Image: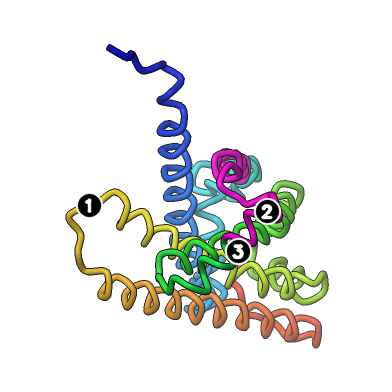
Amino acid sequence: MFKLSPFGRGPAIMDGLQGLSGALLALFLLLHLHLEASILIGPEAFDAVAWFLHAGWADPAGHGYAAMVVAASLVILTLLALHVWTALRRVPIQFRQWRALSRHLHWVHHSGTRWWLVQLVTGMALMIFLPVHLITMMTQPHQISVELSALRIVNEGGWLLYGVLLPLAVLHGVIGLARLALKWLPSFTGRQGLRRITAVVVVYLLVLGGVSLAAHIDNGQRLNDGQSLSVQSR
């Protein structure tokens, strides 16, 4: 009888690592956007979240540790590298592959294929823009406060980077979670309902992230005009 080679498990392992790393990154995105939205409650709320994430509660001086931000960024960067490494094997790299994909999209109108194409395009763009954000967090870990964040976003072009990252990350992450649900839950039959839920979640996160970014921009403009944000000092 033919015996399967142990190397035959490789594609399955790669597929599992791709799904796991992608799911963890998408869940982190959901958490990150909601923590960022604390700016909508007020400057004090945003600084309280930053203080907690910096482990200010463990610092006798109450300031927190910048190493917490660096460590978190390294973890996300590692997950991103793993996800890219496992996903690149499915990226068309030859002209005939792109031509076959184009023909397939023209003749077969299937939402799963369109979702995959959106993930492909957004994923390639994220490979460029997301490391810039993570490296910024690693090199400027102290600049995560309501005032410093607002000034970085307004004066250093952060609004442009985050304005591009937001739709890319939301589309890639939410569609990825939906595709994982279809893949790993074979008994799931509510594809039409899943598409609706996916669209609602995408719109919700885009609005949430967009409004949060607008609040940071408004704060940065107020600071540039010499106005106070009335943040209580710790």
Q: Determine whether 187 is above or below 114 in the image.
A: above
Q: Residue at x 42, y 79 (%)?
A: 204
Q: Is residue 82 magenta?
A: yes
Q: Is residue 71 magenta?
A: no
| Residue 112 falls in image quadrant | bottom left
Q: Position of residue 60 (x, y in %)?
A: 56, 42
Q: Position of residue 144 (x, y in %)?
A: 65, 60
Q: Amino acid at mark 3?
A: Thr
Q: In this figure, which residue is indicated by the disc labeled 1?
A: 186
Colour scheme of this structure image? rainbow
Circle nearer the N terminus (3, 1): 3
Q: Residues within 10 Å of mark 1 (few under 14, many from 20)?
A: few
Q: CA distance from mark 3 to mark 2?
A: 9 Å
Q: Residue at x 54, y 68 (%)?
A: 46
Q: Position of residue 82 (x, y in %)?
A: 57, 38
Q: Determine whether 114 is above or below 208 in the image.
A: above
Q: The magenta stretch spans which residues?
A: 72-100
Secondary structure that dominates the magenta span: helix
Q: In this figure, which residue is indicated by the disc labeled 2?
A: 127
Q: Determine whether 158 is above or below 50 in the image.
A: below
Circle nearer the N terminus (1, 2): 2
Query: Is the residue under label 2 in contact with that under label 1 (CB below 8 Å)?
Result: no
Q: Amino acid at mark 1?
A: Pro
Q: Amino acid at mark 2?
A: Met
Q: Nearer the viewer, residue 209 or 153?
A: 209
